[in-house]
């Protein structure tokens, strides 16, 4: 499993250049630039090496997991539905009209991501249920899942 972190050089946030911060650190990928820093994906050893260069590294643990009460869903699992207990699933007969969805993001939601998703599919975000998971409601997505 790879880890994710928000990283930034010890100066005001902006676009993060891996080559500028740590030319000798391999195995990292910048996924997004955000106001808080860049979301970088890689293994723990590479993130530790990056931190050793003086770069601020804030780990985002378990970004592949959605935790709701006593339920844990691993979005990297082969069949995500297998991880959801039968009693917590939307009944098959009601799925076509079900308006609520869990949306897993790459990191903590930022306004630009929420605005872009809302604009694409007439979605309303109603709540954040985990560090990188929001509940979305949309009549336009009915029958899509």
Image (tube, rainbow, N blue to C red):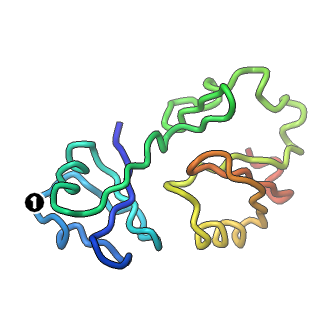
Q: Is residue 119 left or right of residue 15?
A: right
Quadrant (top left, top right, bottom left, bottom right) of the C terminus: top right
Q: Is residue 103 above or below residue 73?
A: below
Q: Relative to the observer, which residue lies in front, 68 or 124? A: 68
> Is residue 19 placed above or below 126 in the rendered structure?
below
For the point 24% across and 63% down, the residue is 55
Disc 1 crowd rating (10 Å Cα; few below 14, some 14-19, many 20+) is few
Counting from the top left corner in percent of width and height, residue 77 is at 50, 31
Q: Residue at x 36, y 44 (%)?
A: 3
State the residue position of label 1: 24
Quadrant of the snapshot with the N terminus:
top left
Residue drawn at x 50%, y 55% as measured from the top left: 107
Residue sticking out furthest to the left: 24
Q: Residue furthest top?
A: 86
Q: Report how many numbered discs are placed on residues in the image.
A: 1
Label 1: state its secondary structure: loop
Q: Is residue 117 left or right of residue 58?
A: right
Query: Which quarter of the picture shows residue 71?
Result: top right
Residue 80: image x %, image y %?
A: 59, 32
């Amino acid at each position: 499993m790879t880890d994710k972190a928000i990283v930034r050089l010890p100066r005001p946030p902006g676009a993060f250049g891996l080559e500028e911060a740590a030319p000798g650190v391999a195995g990292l990928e910048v996924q997004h630039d955000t106001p808080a820093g860049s979301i970088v994906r890689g293994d723990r050893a590479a993130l530790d090496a990056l931190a050793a260069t003086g770069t601020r590294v804030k780990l985002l643990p378990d970004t592949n997991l959605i935790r709701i009460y006593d339920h844990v869903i691993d979005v990297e699992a082969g069949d995500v539905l297998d991880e959801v207990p039968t009693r917590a699933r939307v009944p098959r007969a009601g799925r076509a009209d079900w308006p609520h969805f869990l949306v897993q993001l790459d990191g903590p939601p930022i306004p630009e991501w929420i605005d872009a998703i809302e604009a694409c599919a007439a979605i309303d975000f109603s709540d954040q249920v985990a560090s990188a998971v929001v509940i979305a409601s949309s009549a336009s997505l009915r029958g899509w899942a």
